[in-house]
Amino acid sequence: MPAIEQRFNEAGMNYDTHTSEGNPMEAYKLIKNMENLSDYNLICVAGDDNTFQEVVNGMLIREDGVKLPLGFLPNECQSDILAALGIMSLELALDNIVKAECIGIDTTRVLLDHDNEASLPEDVEERYKLCRHMLSDSSLTMPTNVGMASKSWYSCYSLSIATWMKGLSCSFTPSSFKIEVDGTAIDSGNNVDTSILMVNNGKYSNGGCLVNPFAALNDGLIDLSWVRDPAYFGMFGFRELMNDAKVGGGIQAYKKHSIYMRGRKIKCTYVEQETEQDTEQKTPQPEPAEEPKEETPQENGQTAGGEEETKETKDTKETPKEPEIAEKYVGVDDCDLAYKKSVTWQCFPQNIELMLDTDNYFMEFNSFPELYTRDDEHEKYIVDQIVDDMWQKYDVDGSGDLDKEETKKMVQDICAAEGRPFKAA
């Protein structure tokens, strides 16, 4: 905190500070209920991805609709959101804020077991469990299970340790989903079986792993990926994939073991696996032969005491209860949420503004490999034009290749233009 205050003082910035104790939803409620938020020009947040998410969601649910630019400052935790923005240090994050430049960023609304917000409960905490805006990434099945386990191992090897622990417990099993992208069923509505399914707004997941190199924070789309190759469903496949994402620069995206798609709205519905008991219940059983029996008082509309059975007695007989659906978990920006049937993601383009030094992002962070000047572009255009003109002149037969005679003619003309003798071999 002293380093942040010193930098703001040096820049001549006026500011107020609010310290969170780290309690769940504390930052969410602070921003949601702040009466004089419109008196400020900027909200700076120091924390992890969960803290950033709480502040964003608290701001987006405000009744007055006030939205301010946001400046994210890292703490000691790894942040997938900051990794996607190229903010690798506190000093760089402060540079972004002091420069006072911002860009629009997409958010992704995540709905659990609901198709719209109208059916959500009014209670703030219950609502937040079922609906929130995601900034970076979301995961189903194995990544969520491993991520939940890794939180108990506080070291740089936590993900690897959790992977081995889950593998030793034999808990890597594929799940089945019905997937829709922008209202269209994937794979003709058939079940998609996978143990790794990710939904990304940014490129990074699981503590700085480059899980989806195709994702962008402000393209108006959500990126979906899942592993389709059963050879990667288990512990070793997951470990290889995450290693490629962590140290291989996202090379796993080109190994053809996964499917990558994108859209504005994605829905995944969990398909419950049938148990042996379910199968037995569906299998038609032969009806037993009827045996003659004496008519009892109950069959004659009377109770055992000889009284007639009333309609109320018949109607109050217990009906069998539906089986309880087990809870599953989805990871959303470093927070694990429970759902039972479905998860729906929907992109809200340019929904918030973040402080970002675009010069640093595009050049120093190497978002693009080279920086071209206008002279470079002009020279490249001239060279390309010369090559095109030469090809059109000497490729007489239009084959797209220069054969021996066409090449000979081109070299003769070049030598003549340079005043040099041409000698054929």
Image: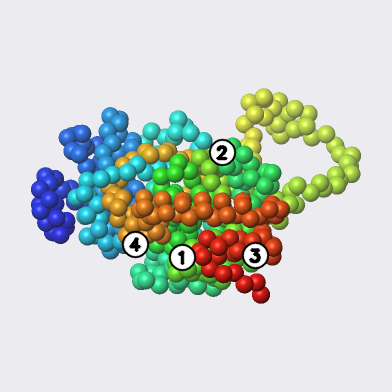
What amino acid is found at the position of numbered circle 4 in the picture? Gln
From the viewer's perspective, is residue 313 above or below residue 412?
above
For the point 44% across and 63% down, the residue is 209
Left or right of 143 in this view: 85: left
Question: What is the quadrant of residue 255 in the picture?
Answer: bottom right
Q: Residue at x 45, y 54 (%)?
A: 380
Q: Quadrant of residue 367?
A: bottom left
Q: Is residue 96 visible?
A: yes
Q: Are marks 2 and 3 in contact (CB under 8 Å)?
A: no
| Secondary-structure class at tag 1 | loop
**x and y, in percent, of residue 254 in the image:** 57, 62
Q: Which residue is mark 4?
A: 78
Q: Secondary structure at mark 2?
A: loop
Number of the label disc, if any, that sits on residue 182: 2
Distance between the Cα atoms at labels 4 and 3?
A: 62 Å
Q: Earlier in the sequence, mark 4 or mark 3?
A: 4
Q: CB of mark 1 within 8 Å of CB of mark 3?
A: no
Q: Which residue, given by chain and number where applicable, does mark 1 sit on? A: 249
Mark 2 neighbour density, 10 Å: few (under 14) some (14–19) many (20 or more): few
Q: Identify which amino acid the numbered label 1 is placed on.
A: Gly
Number of residues whose C-alpha sits closer than 10 Å to that of mark 3, classed few (under 14), some (14–19) or many (20 or more): some
User: Cα distance, mark 2 to mark 1?
Assistant: 29 Å
Cβ–Cβ below 8 Å for labels 2 and 1? no
Check disc 3 and report the residue beneath it: 408
User: Which amino acid does the dot numbered 3 rest on?
Assistant: Lys
Question: Looking at the rendered structure, which numbered label has been put on residue 150?
Answer: none
